[in-house]
Image (cartoon, rainbow, N blue to C red):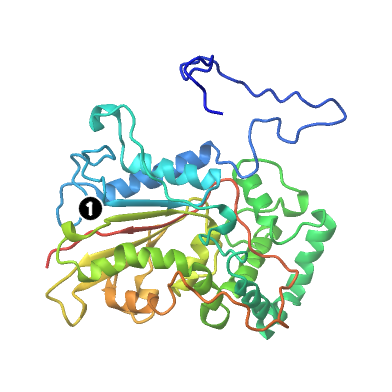
């Protein structure tokens, strides 16, 4: 019913409503007392994503017309800012990923009433229903992922790995000492406890440094290897199928236009930011063939840059180059065909590779009905701070 002019309803109401979590009478209790929910971004995550945004600002905003995307003056999201119309922001519809991406953007493009000229700036943040979103390996919308996962599990490599003495030892810890913990969630518990100073069960309270021989690190490596053997099986087939829509979006919004544009001003999008999960970052790296198999840390960031690089046909036949940077490390040389090329490689190699599989209309139909989903679960997301994938920037070099 629409309120009428005579209605007592008013949009000027000064009522505020407070949720009070005392609606249960013992022995009924709340789990979280209403102050948070599972998977919520916490203050440490806010700090990490602010640092990410500031790092991007130092890299891509400034007065070097060759290497900066936007001039320092006017680099805000206001209606008259130099950024408006040249950026795309994408994320899934979970609180921690939305907040992570938006905090990063606030640090990257500080926008206030003073510098934008308006009281509030409405920013489009493109998202989707989580159950329908391909921003992570989502077998609900692509059932063939289950088939590919089952094929990886049934491979001799995985069977040998999963029946090893190491696997048996770690599984006994999981079942006997950690209350029947499963590989899908164990790193959620380990990492959130370690990184926030919470106590760990004594059997895994032995971590001292990265890559040590502690039970803590051995479980971390085993969980990473489990997932890695799925993502990279049969020439990274699972990762390529899972991440095809995400990479398709990047390909069409920034990479292909960069391949043909004659100037930065002719590009429709200068910056494409996607905020997702560790299980977005890792399959993206695997689909590109550059993943080292290590689980992505909190607040990880994969950057794909493109450059105008004319005058060097022997190195860059397309006249364009790209660079892959992951958490500060340049991975371009690990991309197929780019070995020994240094930090930059011909953009045509990347676009040609992606055009082979990065499509929205991917083939998700199950091909072998006999090969069904195994019960072993390995895909999960870390709940404290979401990893942040890729930022497809387009800085341009002069010849």
The reply to whether residue 225 is in sight is: yes
Q: Nearer the viewer, residue 36 or 7?
A: 7
Q: Position of residue 94 (x, y in %)?
A: 55, 47
Q: Nearer the viewer, residue 155 or 22?
A: 22
**Residue identifier under label 1:** 69
The reply to whether residue 346 is in sight is: no
Q: Nearer the viewer, residue 382 or 76?
A: 76
Count of all numbered marks drawn on residues in the image: 1
Q: Position of residue 27 (x, y in %)?
A: 88, 30
Is residue 182 positioned above or below 355 on the image? Answer: above
Tell me: 184 left or right of 304: right
Find residue 333 and report its image quarter: bottom left
Q: Residue furthest right?
A: 27
Is residue 178 positioned above or below 51 on the image? Answer: below
- For the C terminus, the quadrant is bottom left
Find residue 51 and report its image quarter: top left
Residue shown at the point (21%, 71%) measured from the top left: 260
Residue shown at the point (59%, 63%) measured from the top left: 138
């Amino acid at each position: 019913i629409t309120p009428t002019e005579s209605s007592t309803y008013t949009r000027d109401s000064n009522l505020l409503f407070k949720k009070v979590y005392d609606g249960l009478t013992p022995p009924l209790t709340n789990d979280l007392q209403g102050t948070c929910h599972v998977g919520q971004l916490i203050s440490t995550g806010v700090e990490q994503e602010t640092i990410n945004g500031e790092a991007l600002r130092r890299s891509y905003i400034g007065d070097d017309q060759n290497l900066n995307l936007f001039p320092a003056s006017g680099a805000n999201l206001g209606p008259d800012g130099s950024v408006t119309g040249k950026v795309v922001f994408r994320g899934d519809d979970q609180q921690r990923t939305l907040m992570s991406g938006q905090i990063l953007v606030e640090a990257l493009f500080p926008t206030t009433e003073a510098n934008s000229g308006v009281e509030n700036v409405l920013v489009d943040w493109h998202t989707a229903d989580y159950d329908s979103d391909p921003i992570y390996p989502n077998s609900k919308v692509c059932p063939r992922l289950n088939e590919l996962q089952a094929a990886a599990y049934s491979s001799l490599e995985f069977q040998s790995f999963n029946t090893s003495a190491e696997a048996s030892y770690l599984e006994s810890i999981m079942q006997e000492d950690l209350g029947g913990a499963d590989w899908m969630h164990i790193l959620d518990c380990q990492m959130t406890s370690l990184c926030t100073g919470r106590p760990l069960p004594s059997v895994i309270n032995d971590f001292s440094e990265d890559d040590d021989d502690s039970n803590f690190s051995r479980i971390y490596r085993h969980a990473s290897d489990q997932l890695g053997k799925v993502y990279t099986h049969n020439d990274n087939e699972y990762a390529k199928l899972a991440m095809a829509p995400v990479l398709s979006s990047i390909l069409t919004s920034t990479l292909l236009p960069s391949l043909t544009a004659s100037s930065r001003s002719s590009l429709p999008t200068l910056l494409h930011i996607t905020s997702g999960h560790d299980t977005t970052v890792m399959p993206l790296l695997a689909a590109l063939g550059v993943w080292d198999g290590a689980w992505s840390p909190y607040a990880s960031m994969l950057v794909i840059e493109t450059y105008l690089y004319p005058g060097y046909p022997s190195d860059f036949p397309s006249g364009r180059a790209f660079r892959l940077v992951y958490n500060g490390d340049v991975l371009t040389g690990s991309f197929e065909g780019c070995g020994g090329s240094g930090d930059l490689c011909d953009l045509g190699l990347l676009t040609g590779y992606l055009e082979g599989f990065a499509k929205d209309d991917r083939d998700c139909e199950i091909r072998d009905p006999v090969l069904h989903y195994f019960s072993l679960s390995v895909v999960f997301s870390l709940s404290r701070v979401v990893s942040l994938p890729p930022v497809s920037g387009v800085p341009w070099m002069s010849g």
